[in-house]
């Protein structure tokens, strides 16, 4: 297990000490996200007049909204990946089937060429015999 990190962050104008197993950069990034959400909400008229409890509730709701939107996006992307994986599997299966068919056809073509060469040889022999017969 990695060591616990502790760092001081500034959230909504107050210095807060955060600690966790994540990096200090990550903890600062989280604090920055919270500050950006607070700034975003502060742009809404009437927000500043709300009680601290209501402000915290609105902040929590906005963060939860972001979380569920990203979670839904991640689930959608995972479903897309599953579909693409299945398509990829099907394409590979089709490719293997086509390669097997190609090998079979190649063997058959080689056999037919060999048979043709044998028949050409027999035709030549028969033509030679016919020529000999006609000369007599």
Image (cartoon, rainbow, N blue to C red):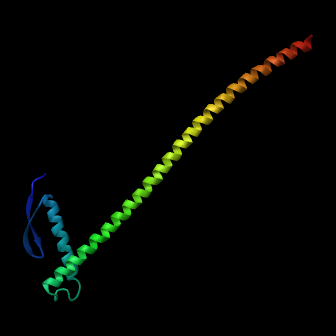
Q: Is residue 36 left or right of residue 70?
A: left
Q: Residue at x 30, y 68 (%)?
A: 70
How far from the left and from the top, in percent, is residue 44? 23, 85
Circle count: 0
Give the quadrant of the C terminus. top right
Please identify the quarter of the rendering in which residue 123 is found: top right
**Considering only vertical position in the picture, is 62 above or below 44?**
above
Q: Residue at x 14, y 83 (%)?
A: 53
In-front residue for pair 94/18: 94
**Considering only vertical position in the picture, is 43 above or below 26?**
below
> Farthest residue in the top direction?
136
How far from the left and from the top, in percent, is residue 18? 9, 65
How far from the left and from the top, in percent, is residue 36? 20, 73
Q: Is residue 81 left or right of residue 125?
A: left
**Considering only vertical position in the picture, is 57 above or below 92?**
below
How far from the left and from the top, in percent, is residue 58? 21, 81
Q: Residue at x 34, y 68 (%)?
A: 72
Q: Is residue 84 left or right of residue 128?
A: left
In-front residue for pair 135/57: 57
Q: Residue at x 14, y 65 (%)?
A: 28
């Amino acid at each position: 297990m990695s060591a616990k990190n502790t760092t001081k962050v500034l959230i909504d104008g107050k210095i807060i000490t955060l600690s966790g197993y994540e990096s200090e950069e990550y903890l600062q990034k989280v604090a920055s996200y919270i500050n950006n959400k607070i700034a975003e909400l502060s742009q809404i008229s009437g927000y500043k007049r709300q009680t601290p409890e209501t402000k915290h509730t609105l902040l929590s709701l906005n963060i939860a909204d972001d979380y569920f939107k990203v979670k839904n996006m991640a689930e959608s992307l995972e479903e897309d990946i599953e579909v693409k994986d299945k398509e990829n599997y099907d394409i590979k299966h089709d490719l293997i089937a086509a390669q097997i068919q190609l090998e079979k056809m190649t063997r058959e073509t080689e056999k037919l060429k060999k048979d043709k060469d044998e028949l050409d040889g027999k035709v030549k022999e028969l033509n030679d015999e016919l020529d000999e017969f006609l000369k007599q």
